[in-house]
Amino acid sequence: MPSLPESPEKTRILADAARARELLLTGTAREVLARIVPEDPLGLRARLRARIRARALLVEVEHVCLRAQALCSWHASSWRGEPELERWLDLRVEEALAAVVAEEPWEGEGDPPLASFAAPLCLDPRDLARACARFNRLPFEQREAFFAVVLDAVAADRLARARNLSLSELARRARSALEVFRRAAQPSSR
C-alpha cells in the first residue's frame, strides 16, 4: 500500500533535523562551532529571544547565543538523537541562560553586554550591567510586571485585571524592579 505524501511542514521539519544532525555529528567541537556560529543554522537566537521574553530577563542575546552555540558544539559528540533534537537544543539554551544569569556582572576590559543602553539611561555601562544582574535575580513576578508596564507599556489597569491583581500590587511589583535601576543611577552606587 503506498504511503500518503507528507505535509510541507513535516517535510521541512525532517529536512531541518537532518541538517542539524549533519552540523552536530561530524567533526570536532571546534569544527561544529565553526559551522553553527556564523548563520545560526540551529535557530538558537529565536529560541533564546522567546525564552528571554518568557522569563522576563535582561540579557544581551548575542552573548547568550554564543554561550549556547559553544555548549552545543561541546555536547554535540555525546548526542545520539536522544533526547529529540528540539528538546536537546532547548536544554542547551536553558543551560546557557542559567550560566549567564548566574555569572557576576561584567568587570572585564571593554564594554559589558547591553552597554549601548547605558548612555540613553545616563548610566555607566558597568553600573547598568550590575543592575541587570540584580534585576535578573528578582522574583519572576517583579520582572514580568516591569517588562509589561515599563518596557512594553501595557496599560496597568488592563494588565492588573488579566493577572487578577490589584492595581497597587502590580505597581508595587513593577516599582520593585524599577528601583534596581534607580539605585544604579545614583552616584553613591558606584
Image (cartoon, rainbow, N blue to C red):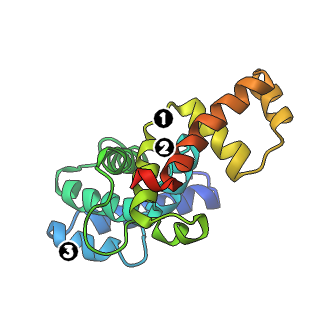
Quadrant of the drawing holding the C terminus: bottom left
Q: Amino acid at mark 1?
A: Leu
133 left or right, relative to 144? left
Q: Amino acid at mark 3?
A: Glu
The image shows residue 37, relative to residue 169, as above or below, that is: below
Picture coordinates of residue 188 (x, y %)?
43, 51
Mark 2 crowd level (few <14, some 14–19, many ≥20, 10 Å Cα):
many
Q: Tell me how far mark 3 sits from mark 2, CA to CA.
A: 36 Å
Camera-side residue of 34 and 152: 152
Q: Are marks 1 and 2 in contact (CB under 8 Å)?
A: yes
Q: Tell me how far mark 1 sits from mark 3, CA to CA.
A: 38 Å
Q: Are marks 3 and 2 in contact (CB under 8 Å)?
A: no
Q: What residue sits right under mark 3 in the picture?
A: 31
Picture coordinates of residue 126 (x, y %)?
38, 62
Q: What residue sits right under mark 1 in the picture?
A: 138
Write down the quadrant of residue 26 in the picture.
bottom left
15 left or right, relative to 105? right
The image shows residue 102, relative to residue 126, as above or below, that is: above
